[in-house]
Amino acid sequence: GPQLRSARLERARAAMSQAMLEGGMVDEDCDDMVNLNTLNADTILRNLQVRFDLTKPYTYVGRIVISTNPFQWIDGLYTRETIVAFSRAPDVFADLNPHVYAVARDALDKLTDLQESQSILISGESGAGKTENTKICMAWLAAIDGSGGGALSDGLPPADGSHPVHEITTRVLQTNPLLEAFGNASTTRNDNSSRFGKFIKIQYDMHGRQVGAHIDTYLLERSRVVRQSDGERNFHVFHALTGGLEAAEKGELDVGTADTYGYLGRRVTKLKSSSEFADDALVWARTQRALDGLGFSDADREEVANAIAGILALGELEFVGEETAEGTSSSPKDPAAVARAATRLAVDASDLSSKMCTRYVAAPDGWFTVLLSVEQCGNARDALAKALYGRLFDWLVARANETIKPEDGVSKAFIGILDI
């Protein structure tokens, strides 16, 4: 029947592809796969495997770049000479080896030539390298912009690898460590997995110079604040707070180690030493520099730390119930835990306790107070923690946008980078 013929045809195609691969009839190490003699799933995967083994993470399909995560930083791939080469080559897709820089250069050329906004879509599964390629594109655009837009000056960038960038460009780059600290986490597949989507619009004037940026974020995984799967961690900033502060700072915030908090799984989860998030103190310091670079005051940074500590303290609230004439009445098991959370959140302890254990219901003849069960109290606690973190994240993004926005009327077009 038709199903049998379809199965036979599929087997024949697979056998032919395998024979072609084994017989060398398919191009290997092809940097643009539109030039493959035979184009199907087998030949595509084979070519990507060959290039991966040769530490060539980038491959073209026309003007699309396929990036395989090499799980290492490859020497020579992101040097100042490479940045210069991709700013000067007449046709980066034809003249140079495949690179994500080519997509950024193509977008910048079209923006300046057509005076129209451009967008770069970076998509893939967790661990594919979306976040890193987003940062690499932004870094190339920032380095190019340091010369005044469009192309670098005749001299190479400084020998130390730094690039002369405008203040606004520096601030735009500072949003990366900030968003990573508050929006990324370690998962079973990726030590720095983005748990939200973002669309960054890098804004340019009519001369092709960066004048500002704007960040839109989507679908923050707020549930991670209160619960993580086995082998995974909460957002980086929680671990940086508990593991990266000096003893005096911990005392001021009344912060313990990760294994003392329910929202951190009551465990200290170490990352491999090669991870840039393995050292909590460095992550905390990097986050503080980003906040400072984006114009957050000392008082702002203290409030951020208090909010993070307050959320962790909320997770320590446990509840007990007792039967009353009106039903089951719940209350916090440890009043001291309520006091610690209330202090960090700058609210009254009795008000916090009341809000965790009751809710108000509207009725035609007024409002009624409903007592919550122990389970419902726990749900209310977790809902508040998730809401607080979501508000904190949105506030940080909004403040960053205020710092990096262009002057009114200056921006004419943008290069958008969607990482989702």
Image: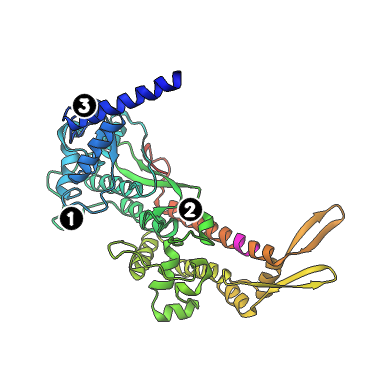
Question: Which secondary structure dominates the residues rendered in magenta?
Answer: helix
Q: Residue 274 vs residue 226: left or right?
A: left
**Residue 192, placed above or below residue 120:** below
* Amino acid type for the residue under numbered disc 2: Ala
Q: Residue at x 50, y 58 (%)?
A: 224
Q: Residue at x 18, y 43 (%)?
A: 152
* Amino acid type for the residue under numbered disc 1: Gly
Mark 3 Cα shell of 10 Å, populated few (<14), some (14-19), many (≥20) = few
| 381 in magenta | yes
Marks 1 and 3 sit apart, C-alpha to C-alpha, by 36 Å
**Residue under pointer 2:** 398
**Residue under pointer 3:** 35
SS class, disc 1: loop
**Residue 210, placed above or below residue 106:** below
Of callouts 2 and 3, which one flags the residue occurring earlier in the amino acid sequence?
3
Q: Residue 255, position in %: x, y?
A: 48, 76
Q: Closer to the observer: label 1 or label 3?
A: 3
Residue nearest the viewer, comparing 136 with 295:
136
Marks 2 and 3 sit apart, C-alpha to C-alpha, by 46 Å
Specify start and end residues of the magenta stretch as a single range: 380-384
**Residue under pointer 1:** 161
Of callouts 1 and 2, which one flags the residue occurring earlier in the amino acid sequence?
1
Q: Residue 324 vs residue 134: left or right?
A: right
Mark 2 Cα shell of 10 Å, populated few (<14), some (14-19), many (≥20) = some
Q: Residue furthest right?
A: 365
Of callouts 1 and 3, which one flags the residue occurring earlier in the amino acid sequence?
3
